[in-house]
Image (cartoon, rainbow, N blue to C red):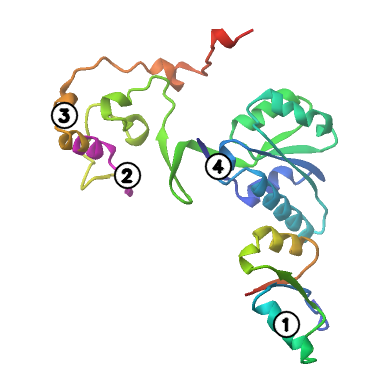
Amino acid sequence: MIVADRKSLDEIQEMIKDYKKILLVGCKGCVTVCNVGGMKEVQVLSSILKIARKKEGRELQVEERTIERQCDFEYVEQLRADCDRFDAILSMACGVGPQFLAEAFPSQKIYPALDTKFFGGAVQHGIWEERCAGCGTCVIHFYDSLCPIARCAKSLQHGPCGGSANGKCEISEDVDCIWDIIVRKKMEQERLEDLRTYRAFKDWRSARDGGPRKSIREELVQ
Amino acid sequence: MNETFEPQIVAYCCNYCAYAAADLAGSMRLSYPSNVKVIQVPCTGRVDILYLLRAIEDGADGIYVAG
C-alpha cells in the first residue's frame, strides 16, 4: 500500500488559516489501512482543528467526508454537489488525492493534510517499512523477492557496498543491509552462484528517470 | 482565569467499577461537585480518543476516565 504520515498540526493550520469553512476529505484506500487518512482520522483531525481554532478565539466549520478512493474520478465526483459550499478542501489521501481533487474542481482550493512516504507494508502493528520503489521494471526475481532497489540505500544491484557491517547498513543501525539478507538467503538455499550471473543494465527509463509515467491497458480503454 | 473558575469535567466511568462506585456513593447520600459530569460507559475500553476530543470541543475543560 501507499504509506503516509499526517502533516504536523502547525503546518495544516498554516495552510487553512484564512478559511472559515473547510471540507475535510478522507480516503478509504491505502491511507485507511495505514491509519492516517480514513474516516476515524478525519474525525480526529476535524475535532483537533476545531479545538485549535477555538483557542485562537475564531471559529472553524469542518464538514467530514470519506470517500471510497480519491484516486478515481468516479468517487471524487461524489463531492461535486457540495464542494462549492466550502472555502477550501483539505485532503487526507496520499499525494494522488489532492491532485485528483484539484483536477476535478479547478476553481476550488485544495490542500494536502498528509506527507506521502512510500510503497510498503506493516511489519508490526504501527510500524510500516518500504518494500517497493515503483521503478517500473521489477527485478526482484533475481534476488529471491527481496528488492535491492527499494531496500538498499544505494539501490545496488550487484552486491553489498563497504558500508555493510554486521547485517546493518551504514546509514543507520536501524536499517538492515538488504544485501546481507539476500546473500544469506542464497547461501542457505545453496544458490549463491545465482549472483554471479551477468545481467544487462537495468532500464531506468521506466522509473522516475523517464519522467511522469502512464499505464495504458488497451483492453480497458473505451 | 479568575479565582472563581471552576473547570467543567467530564468523567467517563466504567459500568462495573467507577460508575458502580458513583452509584453507591449516591445511595449513601454522598455528594460530588456539580461541575463533574458522569458518563457511563460499558467499559473504559469503549472510550475512544474521539470521546475525549468531542468533549473538549463542546466545552469541557478536563476529562477523566475512571475504570
Task: Return the x and y of residue A199 as percentages of the image width and height.
Answer: 23, 17
Separation of marks 1 and 3 at Cα, in angstroms = 69 Å
Cα distance between the residues tagged 4 and 3: 37 Å
Pick whichever, B50 or A163, lies toward us. Answer: B50
> Within the magenta stretch, is there residue A97?
no
Q: Is residue A192 above or below residue B25?
A: above
Residue B3: quadrant of the picture: bottom right
Q: Which residues are magenta?
A: A172-184
Q: For the image shown, how many numbered marks are present on the structure?
A: 4
Residue A76 % position (x, y): 71, 28
N-terminal label among 3 and 2: 2
Q: Secondary structure at mark 2?
A: loop
Tag 1, which secondary structure? helix
Question: Is label 1 in contact with label 3 (beta carbons under 8 Å)?
Answer: no
Q: Residues within 10 Å of mark 1 (few under 14, many from 20)?
A: some
Q: Report the disc number at residue A116.
A: none
Q: Which mark is residue B22?
A: 1
Q: Chain of mark 2?
A: A
Amino acid type of the residue that numbered disc 1 sits on in the rendered structure: Ala
- Residues tagged by mark 4 and mark 2 found on one chain of the structure: yes
Which residue lies under the disc numbered 3?
A191
Q: CA distance from mark 1 to mark 4?
A: 39 Å
User: How far, Cα to Cα, is label 2 from label 1?
Assistant: 56 Å
Residue at numbered disc 4: A33
Amino acid at dot 4: Val
What residue is disc 2 on? A171
Instruction: Give a yes or no on whether discs 1 and 3 share a subunit.
Output: no
Q: Is residue A7 left or right of residue A65?
A: left
